[in-house]
Amino acid sequence: MLDSCKLKSACNLPFIYNKKINTAGTSNADVPLPDPGMYQLDITLRRGQSLAARDRGGTSDPYVKFKIGRKEVFRSKIIHKNLNPVWEEKACILVEHLREPLYIKVFDYDFGLQDDFMGSAFLDLTQLELNRPTDVTLTLKDPHYPDHDLGIILLSVVLTPKEGEHRDAFQTQSLRLSDAHRKSHLWRGIVSITLIEGRDLKAMDSNGLSDPYVKFRLGHQKYKSKIMPKTLNPQWREQFDFHLYEERGGIIDITAWDKDAGKRDDFIGRCQVDLSALSREQTHKLELQLEEGEGHLVLLVTLTASATVSISDLSVSSLEDQKEREEILKRYSPLRIFHNLKDVGFLQVKVIRAEGLMVADVTGKSDPFCVVELNNDRLLTHTVYKNLNPQWNKVFTFNIKDIHSVLEVTVYDEDRDRSADFLGKVAIPLLSIQNGEQKAYVLKNKQLTGPTKGVIYLEIDVIFNAVKASLRTLIPKEQKYIEEENRLSKQLLLRNFIRMKRCVMVLVNAAYYVNSCLDWDSPPRSLAAFVLFLFVVWNFELYMIPLVLLLLLTWNYFLIISGKDNRQHDTVVEDMLEDEEEEDDKDDKDSEKKGFINKIYAIQEVCISVQNILDEVASFGERIKNTFNWTVPFLSWLAIIALCVFTVILYFIPLRYIVLVWGINKFTKKLRSPYAIDNNELLDFLSRVPSDVQVVQYQELKPDPSHSPCKRKKNNLG
């Protein structure tokens, strides 16, 4: 009878924790085991009982980490303010060595601070019975205080041996990628959510008000709303989309918070939306009561079917079929500009092969696979084992929502018992793609600032409707739901400061120039400036403002086509990017206590905010500059068209009528569309223009001549 399993410490601690098994059977100890690397461990995290309180209110916000070989393989969701949480979450893990125990750690989530340790335990996998569900009860302990009772965790586990021929069937399991890339399969629909408002929220501040914001979570997809200061009835008017991966729907977890500067944010309340209860292709207005708090949230939720992405072999390419190609060209023809404005274009990516990749394994080889991302759409290839020159020959198709999106192709090395290793990455703006050309892209490092080892061969085709793309440029960009958390970086802070300083110095130098004219430092120049001032002021009309900007764009355009490009290669930004130190993706240290007091974290949060503000200010100035120097010709042409229209309107129509129309539109907008989302078309346009940092990141590196297909053919002939 299998009555218990041993729970061991990775540090060989002298104590052993017992667990209860609810199923009985023969022991696995004498059964011959299959070859290493052929086990699938299915875990269901059930619940916790009597967990330790770590917050001032006598509760905790627990979540659980699973580790094998000191590498995190699964992390549960956070259950707020509960010492008896119920998770009911499932994880599928491939295990190579049963000698490595499963390490379970429980933490209390602290927003903006280091999470508190709540206990740990080990599960000895060699003692599990094969092919039989087993209920496990783990007693949580603190290695530093073994006498403390920290509660229990209840699991259900199934250990299944896998034969060698089944190896490829599990190559997309959760260990291959970090949480950001786990959703690699195709989604079945889109959930469009509009956060309208909050009503009668709980007052969390001493002034009787709150600074509320809302967090949404669907699986591994997350969204955070903007903060509405000093109100109990916030008006957000924010719209975003989640991908729906399950046929039956899913549960959207929603939590409301009060922002507190310099300390932990206050929890206002939570609610859920069960998508399986909502009908498709219909907009639902939901008024949700906040649990564990006060007030309501008002949402609009729409579920729509989707077939926006696909994966196929190279032999079944969509654009190779003439009939299908004509259908795609017809779909995005100029005559269909008002048909589905969100469907801007079609992208086909052929991931052919890579050459000369970095060695990631001790065998001198790698197990590479490729992840293709477009905004929030993520697809990946199969893994080619033990190969530094893999051939994938896969075709990926995406629907384009924004022609200013950037295609990201990342190569990873698959590791069975830990997270995937980064091998290289390229970022390709859609507007820079040359259709139908097979091209060797030099792989870059994680920051996209310099080369790493290897090249990847891609063939990309973009078909889009220019009018739809222009209209979409004037609405907010799609927000990326899965992004790395901001970390305090001295180098990044210095880089953003220098960037902002360069933008400010342009204005300072202009002010010095004007002052020198007023001081008559150079009499001929001051005289010319004085005459020009009298002429402009005497003849000024409002239409001259866009006209001057139009002339500036036109002048720079003729300089470029005449070969007198006045755009200098920005070596300053590039050098700063190359000097920036690489930040670790995740802190894997097993620290179980806070190492710093709360003030340190408050200072860090302020520094990160300053760092981000510097980045935004610098990026804004650089985007204005890059609009006029034709960094993105599509946007510069769009600016020319807009400036021409504004010039004509301002020339022929009196300003008072224009202001009157604008005012009527602004005053009646909410009456005509109560749930309209406010936006600024000019800022939305500028958000599509790359900053100097992005220009450097998207810049292609020159490939090694030895990787040229023509050169290789000549060498083969020789």
Image: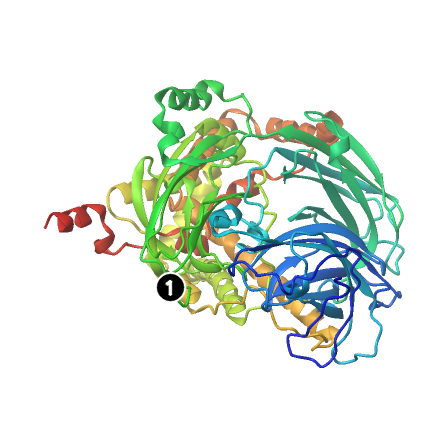
SS class, disc 1: loop
* Number of marks present in the image shown: 1
Judge from the rendering whether residue 470 lies leftward or rightward of residue 300; answer left or right. Answer: left
- 69 or 634: which is nearer to us? 69
User: With respect to residue 497, does 697 lie above or below?
Assistant: above
Q: Where does residue 658 sit, x and y in percent of width and height?
A: 60, 28
Residue on which the image places disc 1: 359
Judge from the rendering whether residue 648 lies leftward or rightward of residue 528; answer left or right. Answer: right
- 701 or 46: which is nearer to us? 46
Within-10-Å neighbours for mark 1: few <14, some 14–19, many 20+ = some
Residue at horizontal 88 percent and vertical 53 percent from the top: 203
From this viewpoint, is residue 454 visible? Answer: yes
Which quadrant of the view contains residue 351?
A: top left
Q: Where does residue 499 sit, x and y in percent of width and height?
A: 48, 62
- 365 or 221: which is nearer to us? 365
Judge from the rendering whether residue 6 lies leftward or rightward of residue 348; answer left or right. Answer: right
Judge from the rendering whether residue 276 lies leftward or rightward of residue 641; answer left or right. Answer: right
Q: Where does residue 657 sit, x and y in percent of width and height?
A: 61, 26
Q: Where does residue 21 sit, x and y in percent of width and height?
A: 78, 60
Q: How is the image coloured?
A: rainbow
The residue furthest left is: 718
- 518 or 130: which is nearer to us? 130
Residue at horizontal 37 percent and vertical 36 percent from the top: 314
Which quadrant would the N terminus be assigned to in this image? bottom right
Q: Amino acid at mark 1?
A: Val
Which quadrant of the view contains residue 579?
A: bottom left
Residue at horizontal 74 percent and vertical 31 percent from the top: 670
User: With respect to residue 533, does 517 lie above or below?
Assistant: below
From this viewpoint, is residue 567 visible? Answer: no
